[in-house]
Amino acid sequence: MTVKIVLRDHESSIPAPISLEDALEQLHLDGELYVVLRNGIAIKSDEILQDGDVVRLIPVMIGG
């Protein structure tokens, strides 16, 4: 029972169920730096990820 976390061309598997916040912490990632999509839908850090979920991290672009 795992969740797939995708950042650019890198994929990680995390045991499920787990909160998004805890999953990002395990991967040493700051959730504030990404838009997070679960199965194509934006979610917040308190969401619980379930077996089979695919989470995509889209880096937030800052600058001008």
Image: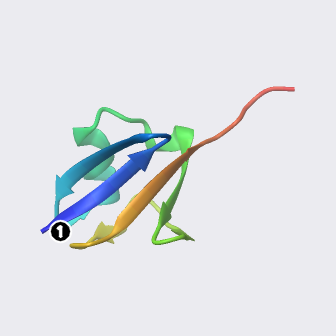
Residue at the spot x=70%, y=35% of the render?
61
x and y percentages locating residue 39 in the rendered image: 46, 72
Q: Which residue lies furthest to the front in this view?
A: 9
Horizontal relation, residue 2 to residue 11: left or right: left
Q: Name the residue under label 1.
A: 17
Whether residue 36 is situated above or below residue 52 in the rendered picture: above
Horizontal relation, residue 57 to residue 22: left or right: right
Q: Quadrant of the C terminus?
A: top right
Q: Which of 14 and 23 is in front in this view?
A: 14
| Helix, strand or loop status at disc 1 | loop
Mark 1: give few (<14), some (14-19) or many (20+) Cα within 10 Å.
some
Q: Which residue lies furthest to the right in this view?
A: 64
Q: Which of 63 and 9 is in front in this view?
A: 9
Amino acid at the residue labelled 1? Pro
Residue at the spot x=45%, y=40% of the render?
9
Q: In which quarter of the image is residue 11?
A: top left
Q: Quadrant of the N terminus?
A: bottom left
Whether residue 60 is situated above or below residue 20 in the rendered picture: above
Whether residue 1 is situated above or below residue 15 in the rendered picture: below
Residue at the spot x=29%, y=68% of the render?
49
Residue at the spot x=30%, y=57% of the render?
4
x and y percentages locating residue 42 in the rendered image: 55, 67
x and y percentages locating residue 36 in the rendered image: 51, 56
x and y percentages locating residue 15 in the rendered image: 14, 58
